Image (spheres, rainbow, N blue to C red):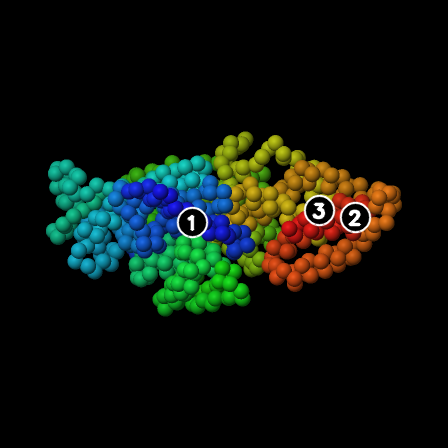
Amino acid sequence: MAKNKLIKDNYFEVETVDTGPTCFLEEDVYVPEEFVRNRALIRIDMNIVQFPIFSKNTRRKKNEITTYFFNKNKDIFITVTPAAGDLIPGEAEERIFIALMKIMKEKGMEQEFIATAREIKEAAKINTNNYLSDIKKAISRLSKSNYTFKNTMYSNELGIILSGEISTPILTYKSQSEIPLGEIKKIKSTINDNRIKEFYLIKISDHFYKNIVKRGYLVYDSDILLDINSSIARTLYMLLEKIRFNNLCIRESVFALIKKIPLKYEKRSLPITIKTLEKAFSELKAKNLIKDFKFLKETTWLESDVEIYYTEEHNILKKERFDDDNRELKEIYNNLAISYTEKNIKELKPEIIIDDEMVKEIIELMPDKAKKLKSIYKTVENNLEKYGYAKVKAAAIYLAAQKKLTSPRAYFLKILENNWASDLVEEISLKDEKNTDIALEEDESIDVNNENRELIFSEFQKLPKEIQDGIEGYVYREYIKLCGIETKVQQIAFLGSRKKLICDYLEKYPELLGTIKNKEKVEEVKIQEVNKENENLIVITDKDKLKKYINEYIDLYEDLLDEKTESLENAKKRIILDCMPAFLNNILTLESLEEIIRKNLI
């Protein structure tokens, strides 16, 4: 017997299918575009921070397979499958995982390491007497739960989101009872603790481990994480640290945060969810992990925002975490004879031949203030050797998106050092070229030569600002449609390829180019004739009148229907683009303009 429950709006669908001993739970965590906005130090894989790896559902069921969807088409998702008769990982497993990351650091960052039950108890700050069974149950659940990533697993090894399905547990392990007696004696001889009751041979799965050792990670203080009482507050803290970079004030959609954690937002459960979120923020404030927060609610909670404030001290502590972690890891690598970790880092580092063209290409992506610096060429060149093409290019795009820059070179180095642009590397893929095996993935079938592109773009820049915005709006929508998802990553990455994408679009629609290039001839001819059936219609030839009519029409529409301003701004851009060819040819009638407006407001 199957039960289906469909929530009407925002593409959120929870579907539970009862098939006897096994059941399925599907959660859509796609955020629609309008909502888009020391030894204790541990490295957390970017995927674990970004995605709901540990469930916040306190009513998990045995044998319940949970799928989280990240787009409307449901082809970008993560499925968590528990072991037979068990639950998917939750709060308890998250604490044990954090503890294991701390122990792995203490053991020299090797992929496979020994952890005693007492070490895990102390690292996880467990105070119960029944810790042996709790730890064993959590480690077993971490090992036996399988994660299937479909177009979601980020690989820092390749610098991209891996396409297709990737299935992996978080870790595998062997308990003391599964290890031969001879090996047990050898292991115990290396542990200076006579109180050993149980130990585990832990191995972190390849996909997560490679990110942890090769910059696909964020640095957190395990003591801080484990001191946070609420699992929701802990996830919120890790998400906000990733989102904010070094900003002292960020504004996020409440709905987006609810979906990223994720929490329920159905009408009946929304008031409880908001209280839970507020309680999580309050805990972070009480522990001085944020300075303050403020909800900004004008209409409904799902359309509200929250502002989160930080101090300079938060940034200093964040930078110190990265610096301390890097320094400690260098010491670990230096003290180890060619360890598995060090060996893999060498294997994963791409060898590229850096030439003048590559350096100039990166500089071209930077803001004008950075381009003017005499030292910028050498800075880019040195960091291409250190970090590789994909990361430096991502950092340049990220730099260009910053509005206020007092020291662009220093900020560029911080981006690379702290890995702030790691998500942007998703937009950059590996490709064989003449002197390097790393480049931005491009569709060569529609590429135009540089000279022609410059000509097209110069003509584009001669257009009125409203028409430029309209064209760019269309180009952006096509770009997002190809990406399949819209986040801040795609928004910033679009800026890096804006010029090329606009030129490709104008070449794809040559009628627009023809209108632009022949504008002078059109004005000389001044087409006076209109089809006989249209002789009595009003032809709009004045730009100010056109603009005034569109604005008044949309303002009235907004007043009558209480439409959201943001969606109407997008509609206005589409209207301008649709009427542009007829307007430039002096054949845009009032009737045809009204038809264009109606079509774009439906």
| Crowd tier of the residue under label 1, counting other residues whose Cα lies within 10 Å: few below 14, some 14–19, many 20 or above | few
The N terminus sits in image quarter: top left
**Does residue 174 appear left or right of residue 25 in this picture?**
left
The amino acid type, in three-letter code, at marker 2 is: Leu
Q: Relative to 449, is 578 above or below?
A: below
Task: Give the CA distance from mark 3 to mark 1.
Answer: 40 Å
The amino acid type, in three-letter code, at marker 3 is: Asp
**Does residue 454 appear left or right of residue 86 in this picture?**
right
Mark 1 or mark 2, earlier in chain: 1
| Crowd tier of the residue under label 3, counting other residues whose Cα lies within 10 Å: few below 14, some 14–19, many 20 or above | some
The amino acid type, in three-letter code, at marker 1 is: Lys
Task: Give the CA distance from mark 1 to mark 2.
Answer: 48 Å
Residue that numbered label 3 is attached to: 578
Number of the front mark, 1 or 2: 1
Mark 3 or mark 1, earlier in chain: 1
Number of the front mark, 3 or 1: 1
> Mark 3 and mark 2 in contact (Cβ < 8 Å)?
no
Quadrant of res 144: top left
Residue that numbered label 2 is attached to: 588
